């Protein structure tokens, strides 16, 4: 596959193997990964518009800590090198509180705690935070509307905003399967080619 990404015969053979591995897995996520790779190998990445993951229903069902974890995996860690800050997030309407820490180019959060020495404390109702999570408003918008209260230095918010990366859902699960055009195979898949003067032991 890596040597001849357009070799459809090899792609189909690998897809057959992934398909069988998928059928034997009890875990739905592992099974779906194998079956998705098999589909990509045979047909390429599906065309069309991907389903929205930021609809109101999805956002309301998402736990606050899940959103904070999403921020952690959405940032460019290379830009965060050497950056350090601590932010408290308090949502009074549901009684939640979090301490969010940036260190070692990693954004982490702990539920149920706040840091008295945090650089910034943000107080905002979770119901109002939904608009931020959907991308309809910024923290600054919420602050201007009196829906969010900042206590401390707001610099961490600007720093975090500059680290975010917008993911595109049309990525190849298996490398080399991005809609490669099938081409007639010149050799059989995995066929060993022995040059003159060589032996099988070579």
Image (cartoon, helix red, strand yellow):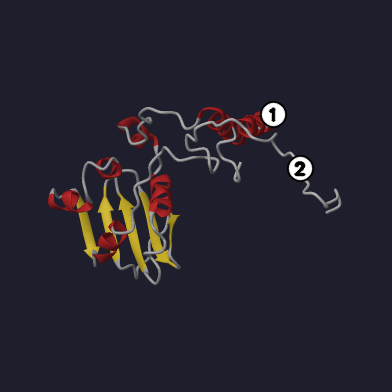
Q: Earlier in the sequence, mark 1 or mark 2?
A: 1
In the rendered image, the vertical position of residue 51 relative to residue 91, given as above or below: above
Asked if residue 109 lies left or right of residue 141, the reply is right
Query: Where in the figure is residue 176, as x and y percent of width and height?
Result: 53, 42
Mark 2 neighbour density, 10 Å: few (under 14) some (14–19) many (20 or more): few
Q: Quadrant of the C terminus?
A: bottom right
Q: Nearer the viewer, mark 1 or mark 2?
A: 2
Question: Which of the pair 28/126 is nearer the observer?
Answer: 28
Dot label at residue 173: none
Question: Which of the pair 154/158 is nearer the observer?
Answer: 158
Total numbered labels = 2
In the rendered image, the vertical position of residue 125 relative to residue 48, given as above or below: below
Residue at 37% x, 27% y is 48
Q: Quadrant of the N terminus?
A: top right
Residue that carries the numbered disc 1 in the rendered image: 20
Mark 1 neighbour density, 10 Å: few (under 14) some (14–19) many (20 or more): some
Asked if residue 172 lies left or right of residue 130, the reply is right
Q: Please tell me whether mark 2 sits on a helix, a strand or a loop.
A: loop
Question: Which of the pair 95/16 is nearer the observer?
Answer: 16
Residue at 25% x, 41% y is 131
Dot label at residue 192: 2
The residue lying furthest to the front in this view is 196
Residue at 45% x, 40% y is 171
Query: Where in the figure is residue 195, as x and y percent of width and height?
Result: 77, 49
Query: Where in the figure is residue 22, as x and y percent of width and height?
Result: 65, 31
Give the quarter of the image for residue 167.
top left
Query: Where in the figure is residue 91, as x and y percent of width and height?
Result: 31, 49
The residue lying furthest to the left in this view is 144
Give the quarter of the image for residue 151.
bottom left
């Amino acid at each position: 596959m890596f040597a001849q990404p357009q070799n459809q015969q090899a792609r189909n053979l690998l897809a057959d193997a992934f398909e069988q591995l998928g059928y034997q897995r009890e875990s739905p996520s592992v099974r779906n990964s194998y079956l998705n790779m098999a589909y990509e190998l045979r047909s390429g990445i599906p065309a069309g518009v991907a389903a929205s993951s930021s609809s109101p229903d999805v956002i309301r069902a998402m736990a606050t800590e899940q959103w904070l974890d999403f921020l952690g995996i959405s940032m460019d860690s290379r830009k965060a090198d050497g950056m350090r800050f601590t932010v408290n997030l308090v949502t009074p309407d549901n009684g939640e509180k979090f301490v969010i820490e940036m260190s070692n180019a990693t954004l982490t959060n702990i539920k149920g705690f706040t840091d008295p020495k945090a650089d910034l404390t943000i107080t905002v109702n979770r119901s109002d935070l939904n608009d931020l999570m959907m991308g309809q408003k910024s923290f600054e918008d919420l602050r201007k509307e009196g829906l969010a209260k900042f206590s401390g230095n707001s610099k961490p918010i600007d720093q975090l905003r500059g680290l975010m990366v917008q993911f595109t859902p049309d990525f190849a699960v298996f490398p080399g399967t991005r809609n490669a055009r099938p081409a007639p195979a010149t050799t059989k898949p995995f066929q060993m080619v022995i040059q003159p003067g060589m032996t099988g032991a070579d």
